[in-house]
């Protein structure tokens, strides 16, 4: 009996409960508070939730319970072993049951334990199926008995729905908290190896840890400043391209373009956001980079073929749609009244846009820019391919730089031990990036609240 | 069963097909109605080819001649002639869709903002056709201000709302002069006493009637010669309406005012001349007292006595 039998039983019970609950009012033929469907839903809700809670609880408890039972069958000398080795043995047992590769030839006691494991598993599946059946029957039977003309099933179903919606909306919040915590704990480990001061203010980045003590350059340097200036430089360049181009094209599309041009141009602009970043990456590396170098040579400037400028420009093109599409929508949403009011006072179209529409649409525009900025800060592929890996501390856009995200990737690829400063540094960088973008969002929200001109 | 063709009445003989009888009766009724309608319409159209009453004004500041407006294929205004006299209030009345709002929007070329709109004929302000090639729309709108149906203050402070026009037209050389313009405009719009302590709060926080007076102050601040009002009181309560009507009376000392209204009482109260529009034509125009007491046209009479519209 597979473990999901219990769920199938529950589903069948729920359908049955709904059907019975629905039929119940008709059986009496009196005036009921709610429509029959609500009584059906009421019974179904009572059938499914308690049993489902029981099922989840069982699933949480079951592995630990089975493990303790299985290990108890092992001979005493094996139980003396340290926790880690015991874990290996237990893994062997499970592998044997599931038909995976087992280390070495399984001994007598392992085979015995494995058959015990199988038996326990079977019993547990049967148990939960029975438990769900009983719980579902009991709770839906109770709910069915409560179905009376005076029962306000409609309101109760409404309340359940509201709780369901609330639960759905908290999923994203808890995920964010979870991500933050997982990064935080790894970062704390890193800060036990490297001082936070060095990490935050150190000017050199060379995340090498020695394998042999006599290795050259074994010291390792974990100063994150060059990475953050690199990120800042490239994102800044990208925004320098995307904000003016995006905003101006949004204004053109929403205020000047006729319906036909708009219908063609807007989707085409949005296509830019759909191009994979790898494609942007090689466009930057193979086309824009060399072009910039040749262009620089013509003016006697030394432009390295992997430069912040090339990556920034291409990234700017990539994030134009975030700015333009959102700005276009919010400018369009400003009531026609305000346009008419301004035009009727003898303002020109561009005066109207500058002084009435943009201030009124500011929150949306800033929202679009923020979204674009967070895309730029988090972007990795273009930078890997077009800006290089060298952690230079420079403000010169013609040189190669690297960014936080690129370093995080290079730290974590390949065979790595997960307790060295080198790999843990990735989590510290992640934490810092997380905090930075959060701060950016908060500041931007403040600014918008201060300057927005709220209509309606 | 027999059915009387002319009367459309049905005598239902027992056991005969009722629905068929009803159908025939309905058909006859519709036919009669159509005939009546078309004869009435042709009368109307013939009658309305020229406007009854004198469409000129003694001291005309704007003259509209043979104005036609099209929205795509829809002929919304049909050869309208009308003068707007200095220091007078002229009200435009008529049933919904008769073209009075379209006409008023021709006077400051607000119809330009509608892509499909086309205006023919000429409208002269100070000897110049505002639809000529050389005409400057931006300056025209500064000289012919407009107040809309729904109050539409900008989401800026009260002060900035009024200062908006003077700023873009460069009317105030310095801050003091601007303060002066803002104060006098608000005073003339009868709003100063209520807002002088909250000049820097959002104009959108005022009540509906105050917002509409703010919009009037905003229009006055640019120093226009004509103010167009497109049903300025239709979104306001009776007290705010009375306020605005008093204000209109006061403003006519300095401005020519064209007001579109659905309220005949309002037209009677505030205007010196009244123009009645029907289906895109100007049916009748004359002194307000004359139009309401002894209308020249049957259509006008039907409308002002509330027989339709």
Image (cartoon, coloured by chain):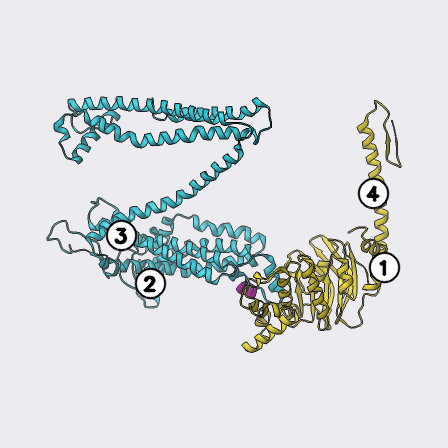
Chain colours: A cyan, B yellow
Circles 1 and 3 on the same subunit? no
**Which subunit holds the residue at mark 3?**
A
Q: Is residue B265 above or below residue A154?
A: below
Q: Residues within 10 Å of mark 3 (few under 14, many from 20)?
A: many
**Which subunit holds the residue at mark 4?**
B
What residue did someone put label 4 on? B34
Circles 1 and 4 on the same subunit? yes
> What SS does tag 3 mark?
helix
Circles 4 and 2 on the same subunit? no
Q: Viewer-nearest of labels 1 and 4?
A: 1
Give me the disc on residue A428.
3
As drawn, which residue projects farthest toward the left? A214
Residue A292: in magenta span? no
Quarter of the image where one finds residue A228? bottom left
What residue did someone put label 1 on? B295
> Percent from the top left, x then y, of residue B270?
75, 65
Q: CA distance from mark 1 to mark 3?
A: 87 Å
Q: CA distance from mark 2 to mark 3?
A: 26 Å
**Which subunit holds the residue at mark 2?**
A
Q: CA distance from mark 3 to mark 4?
A: 84 Å
Q: CA distance from mark 1 to mark 4?
A: 27 Å
Q: Is residue A185 above or below residue B123?
A: above
Quarter of the image where one finds residue A112? top left
What residue did someone put label 2 on? A397
Region of the chain picked out in magenta, as a range:
A350-355
User: Do the residues bearing badges 4 and 2 touch, measured as CB atoms within 8 Å?
Assistant: no
């Amino acid at each position: 009996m597979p473990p999901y039998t219990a769920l199938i039983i529950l589903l069948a019970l729920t359908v049955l409960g709904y059907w019975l609950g629905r039929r119940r009012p008709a059986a009496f033929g009196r005036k009921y508070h709610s429509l029959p469907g609500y009584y059906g839903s009421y019974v179904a809700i009572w059938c499914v939730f308690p049993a489902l809670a029981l099922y989840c609880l069982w699933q949480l408890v079951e592995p630990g319970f089975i493990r303790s039972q299985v290990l108890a069958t092992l001979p005493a000398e094996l139980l003396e072993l340290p926790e880690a080795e015991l874990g290996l043995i237990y893994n062997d047992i499970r592998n044997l049951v599931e038909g995976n590769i087992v280390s070495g030839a399984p001994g007598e006691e392992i085979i015995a334990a494995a058959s015990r494991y199988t038996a326990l598993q079977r019993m547990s599946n049967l148990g939960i199926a029975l438990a769900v059946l009983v719980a579902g029957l009991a709770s839906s039977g109770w709910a069915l008995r409560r179905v009376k003309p005076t029962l306000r099933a409609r309101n109760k179903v409404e309340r359940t729905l509201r709780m369901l919606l609330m639960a759905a909306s908290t999923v994203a919040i808890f995920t964010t908290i979870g991500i933050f915590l997982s990064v935080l704990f790894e970062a704390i480990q890193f800060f036990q190896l490297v001082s936070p001061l060095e990490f935050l203010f150190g000017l050199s980045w060379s995340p090498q840890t020695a394998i042999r003590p006599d290795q050259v350059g074994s010291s390792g340097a974990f100063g994150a400043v060059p990475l953050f200036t690199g990120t800042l430089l490239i994102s800044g360049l990208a925004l320098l391209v995307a904000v003016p181009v995006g905003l101006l094209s949004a204004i053109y599309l929403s205020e000047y373009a006729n319906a036909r041009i708009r219908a063609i141009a807007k989707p085409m602009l949005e296509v830019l956001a759909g191009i994979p970043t790898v494609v942007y990456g090689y466009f930057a590396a193979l086309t824009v980079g060399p072009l910039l170098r040749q262009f620089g040579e013509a003016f006697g400037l030394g432009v390295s073929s992997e430069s912040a400028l090339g990556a920034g420009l291409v990234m700017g093109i990539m994030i134009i749609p975030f700015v333009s599409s959102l700005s276009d929508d919010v400018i369009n949403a400003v009531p026609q009244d305000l346009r008419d009011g301004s035009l009727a006072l003898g303002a020109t179209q561009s005066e109207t846009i500058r002084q009435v529409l943009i201030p009124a649409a500011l929150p949306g525009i800033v929202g679009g820019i923020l979204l674009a900025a967070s895309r730029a800060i988090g972007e990795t592929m273009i930078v890997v391919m077009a800006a290089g890996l060298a952690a230079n501390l420079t403000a010169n856009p013609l040189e190669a730089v690297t960014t936080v995200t690129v370093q995080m990737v290079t730290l974590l690829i390949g065979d790595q031990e997960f307790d060295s400063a080198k790999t843990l540094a990735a989590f510290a960088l992640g934490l810092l990036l997380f905090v930075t973008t959060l701060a950016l969002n908060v500041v931007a929200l403040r600014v918008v609240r201060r300057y927005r001109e709220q209509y309606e | 069963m027999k059915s009387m063709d002319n009367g459309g009445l049905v005598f239902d003989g027992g056991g005969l097909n009722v629905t068929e009888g009803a159908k025939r009766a309905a058909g006859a009724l519709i036919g009669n109605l159509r005939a009546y309608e078309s004869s009435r319409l042709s009368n109307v159209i013939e009658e309305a080819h020229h406007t009854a009453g004198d469409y000129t004004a003694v001291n005309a500041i704007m003259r509209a001649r043979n104005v036609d407006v099209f929205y795509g294929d829809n002929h919304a205004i049909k050869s309208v002639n009308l003068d707007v006299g200095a220091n007078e209030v002229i009200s435009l009345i008529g049933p919904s869709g008769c073209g009075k709002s379209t006409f008023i929007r021709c006077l400051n070329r607000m119809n330009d903002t509608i892509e499909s709109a086309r205006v023919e004929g000429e409208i002269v302000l100070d000897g110049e056709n505002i639809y000529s090639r050389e005409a400057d729309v931006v300056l025209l709108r500064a000289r012919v201000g407009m107040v809309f149906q729904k109050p539409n203050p900008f989401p800026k402070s009260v002060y900035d709302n009024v200062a908006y026009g003077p700023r873009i037209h460069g009317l105030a050389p310095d801050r003091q002069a601007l303060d002066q313009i803002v104060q006098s405009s608000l005073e003339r719009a009868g709003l100063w006493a209520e807002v002088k302590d909250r000049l820097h709060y959002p104009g959108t926080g005022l009540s509906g009637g105050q917002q509409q007076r703010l919009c009037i102050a905003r229009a006055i601040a640019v120093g226009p010669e004509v103010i167009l009002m497109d049903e300025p009181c239709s979104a306001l309560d009776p007290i705010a309406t009375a306020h605005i009507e008093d204000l209109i009376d006061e403003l006519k000392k300095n401005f020519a005012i064209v007001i579109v209204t659905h309220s005949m009482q309002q037209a009677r109260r505030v205007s010196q001349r009244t123009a009645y529009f029907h289906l895109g034509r100007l049916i009748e125009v004359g002194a307000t007292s004359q139009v309401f007491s002894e209308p020249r046209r049957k259509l006008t009479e039907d409308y002002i006595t509330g027989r339709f519209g």
